[in-house]
Amino acid sequence: MAAQTGTTAEAAPTAASDEGSAIDEIVVTAQKRSESLQRVPLSISALSGDALANRAIDSLTSLATSIPSMTFGSYGGTARISVRGIGFDMINPGGEGRIAYHVDGVYISRPAATMGTFFDVERVEVLRGPQGTLYGRNATGGSINVITRKPADHLEGYVELGYGNYNALTAEGAISGPLAEGVGLRLAYTGEHRDGYGKNIVTGNDIDNARRYGFRGTLSAKLGENGKFDLIGDYYHEHDRNYGNHYFGQGNAAITPFGFAFGGVVPTSRRDIANDFDPSNDRTFWGVSGRGELNVGDLTLTSVTGYRDSKWKTVTDLDITSAPLSIFSFFEKSHQFSQELQVAGDIGAAKFIVGGYYFNEKITGGSKIPLDAALVFGPPSQFVQGYWAQGTFNTDALAGFGQLDYALSDQFSLTLGARYSWERKKLNDFVQFDLFTPYPPEATDPNAIYQGANARSETAFTPKFGLQYEPRMGLMFFANVSKGFKSGGFNIGDGNGGFAPETLWSYEAGMKGTFADGRVRINATGFYYDYKNLQVSKVVNATVPIENAAASTLYGAEAEITVMPVDGLRIEVAPAWLHSKYTDFRSANPADPFNPTPVVLDGNQLIQAPELSLNSSMEYGFAVGSGTLTLRGELNWQDRIYFT
């Protein structure tokens, strides 16, 4: 439980119009142009910054409670975002997400790096379904677009402070204002400091605690009458004792015989651990981006440039005991650069956008399981014995894209889009397993059991076809057929060519309507997915390799219903139904890797794919003096899901 207070110099718009009778209109940029949410022929949910504040949404975890068909989890510090049962489940440097995550138009490749960007937000948009035309790579299941707040033309700011049990302290704030004519600056901060939910009873220190903070600075400038430019820099750091392995159940020496033989104990509380050292989690992410827009006649020219840097390392006790046997370390460093150029405009009854995209990324990562050298060689030195797997991944990607929206009549419109993508990936890797020959911690062993170099190039064509029908203002029906693509890749230590690309064909139909003089809004969508070569991960000893499931099928529906029966009262209900299963999946048994007979997984449900879910809320706001007091309650429910 927590308490929070805040002050702000910003005037927050209410959820209703000036008369308090109509549901607010949200303007989004899902199709890379500003338009009303109700006029976008896509399955999309959007929340303004004020709506996020009213719902106490300050992370992707809490965002999932307000978005139908979206689930969120984390494993080892990696964000596991899933939309309609399609998401990220790969704790592997060679794995990439299927939900493209963008902050101010810049794609963030590494899933772990997404968790430090959600503060001082103006708006968040969640697009469901493949977005292969406008967003391209790794948008098989959808896209999440976070738009941060920009500088204001007057001095303003806010501070939000929170306190809760476990001595949880949270803070978020920003200050913004003009520096000169046409130039503004905004500075934002977020931080959290919390004691641990448990303890390591061997060291006496807290575990599962929180120590994190982040900054963002935004400089905006008008370029004459027809242009503008935003320069954004951000930094996020996290250092805490998270992601330790917990032992569940009664003490049983047969489960970890070596550990208990060396004096290991089992804690009485499941929140506690009994390890010879504390787990650790260190993450640092930073980036710089620039966005420029220039209006030239009827055309808008846009450039979005981004650079991201991330470092991430976790260390935990592999044997889960107080015996000094072994540890597990996962590490990853990445650098990415992206550049996108767009030209958009209107010609008669047609709206169009064309553009080009370039992406480059270098990732160095892997895992280590060093054994305690003192057990065999006496006092530890700078050398370590054990298992070490490491790889350097290089990716280059190019794409050209375009989309045309054409009004066939006052009521019918047609959408045609396409993207052509080229990607090249390289991997240089090695694996060592040596119990007796010490090796320097950061040097490649010339006697490694595996050293490899792999490369692959792929192309993809991802089209989109859409038809819209608007019988009246405020009511629209739409149907879309689109394709998503995710390139293949490599597993460290796998000399068999890695895993193949995956493709998804989506068939979707829906409606968006506003009724009762704007007091009722209903958005609903049904969909069918034909999924080929789905990339899945499995746990094999200390590795998490990726392989392809031959095929899977998903179909379902979701709806968002908002009602304002009386002034000040707002009711929201968002049910979702999803059917998912593997239709053809044979996999080696990770528990018996030498058995040539594969495990048949046909008919199994996909991970993070609940069959039923419901998000609902009710709020009532009324005037108190010169302000407004809002009472809000939420009820969220989700069916069972599979994690692996």
Image: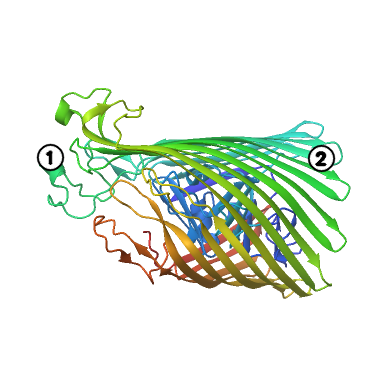
Residue at image coords 87%, 51%:
298
User: Counting other residues with Cα less than 10 Å from the Cα at mark 2, is it few (<14), some (14-19), or many (20 or more)?
Assistant: some
Residue at image coords 48%, 70%:
553
- The quarter of the picture where the C terminus appears is bottom left
Mark found first going from the N terminus, 2 or 1: 2
- Residue at the left extreme, as displayed: 261
Which of the two discs, 2 and 1, sits closer to the camera? 2
Q: Is 580 positioned to the left or the right of 243 in the image?
A: right
Q: Position of residue 246 (x, y in %)?
A: 27, 48
Whether residue 141 is visible: yes
Q: Position of residue 532 (x, y in %)?
A: 49, 64
Query: Which residue is at the front of the view, 212 or 548?
Result: 548
Quickly name the residue at label 1: 263
Is 169 placed above or below 95 here?
above
Q: Position of residue 590 (x, y in %)?
A: 29, 56
Q: Is 107 positioned to the left or the right of 39 in the image?
A: left
User: Counting other residues with Cα less than 10 Å from the Cα at mark 1, is it few (<14), some (14-19), or many (20 or more)?
Assistant: few
Q: Quadrant of residue 207?
A: top left
Mark 2 falls on what kind of element?
strand
